[in-house]
Image: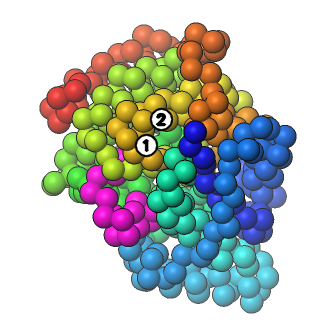
Amino acid sequence: MGFISFLRHDIFRSHENPPMHPEKAERLLAIDNAIAASSVANYLISITPRMAQESELCKIHSPSYIEKIENAANLAKGQNKLLQLDGDTFLSAATLDVAKLAAGAGLQAIDSLDDEKISSAFIAVRPPGHHALAGRQMGFCIFNNIALAAEYARTRFGFKRILIIDWDVHHGNGTQDIFYDDPGVLFISLHQYPWWPYETGWFTEDGVGEGKGYNINIPLPAGTGDSGYIAAWDRLISPVALEYKPDLILVSAGYDAHRNDPMSSQQITSAGFGLLSQRLRILCEMIGVKNACFLEGGYNTEALAESVLGTLTALSKNGVSNIEAYQLTSDLSPKEVEERIVQLSKHFRQYWKSL
């Protein structure tokens, strides 16, 4: 039975946002408490993360952007106050060190997968990362943790094909932008559409140059439930992944598509996230690769903790293997979801024979 390397640190709670901001330290505390009360803790190998070095951050982020964040951090420390970097992204006195540690946690997670007894990794960090662009913070994100890990996996271990699946309710625009012309990274994003960020995420954004066809957006209508997400996985993600045959699978594991989350209109349940995670494990077993899940969104702390626990349980092979054992939530507009999946299949058939 494969073990899961679990990357966490109390310092992640010291990144501050204004009162009432949804991205808060209590998110990680809820996850810690849920794990402590569960038997899944027996399958976790705790790893203390290290900070990413500037040379490692520069593999994805521009030196001028890193300098900008460092200057802002010094100002925040000197004035001992929060700095607002954009409409919803803030920097406190501790944020720079915390963000470097979040980025470094992803790199150490990749290292941990070199251990034979470890089959998966879960990176429980904040701030999240998938909205961060090479030269700009965005959407609560400072550094793009999953993009940095993907590049590290290529340079450190020589992986040629990396699959990134993003099931956060918001489009992973930063990750898309970073790898948009790169066939060495297949990026697949499931997200509510239209939703934030409003200018990205439609399926015709399918890559450029050599990366054409290696960027797959799955924009799902508001109200899509477990049924629609499972259908999208089975009919789009799984066939393409099996055809691509990645060396490694990374997941931007946001849990804000949960039906109880205040940041979306989707209808996934905690059990639904467990089923998606189980499909991830089965897909990895079929291809013969390992996976790492990076915490992104999820702002109802109870739903977040339940969903993360579902992911860890499924990845530890203790999850229920029978889909009929769950009461799946239906899609509020099943016809619209079905039409969208058919539309996506037709579009991406020009790039992928399996569709």
Q: Secondary structure at mark 1?
A: strand
Residue at image position (38%, 50%) is: 248
CA separation in Å, label 1 and label 2: 10 Å
Find residue 50 and name its label.
none
Residue at image position (73%, 64%) is: 9
Q: Residues within 10 Å of mark 2 (few under 14, many from 20)?
A: many
Residue at image position (35%, 22%) is: 235
Which residues lie in the magenta part? 148-165
Against 289, residue 150 (above or below) is below
Q: Which residue is mark 2?
A: 280
Mark 2: amino acid: Leu
Residue 210 magenta-drawn?
A: no
For the N terminus, the image quarter is: top right
Mark 1: amino acid: Ile
Nearer the N terminus, badge 1 or badge 2? 1
Q: Are marks 1 and 2 in contact (CB under 8 Å)?
A: yes
Note whether residue 161 is visible. Answer: yes
Residue at image position (77%, 78%) is: 81
Q: Which residue is mark 1?
A: 165
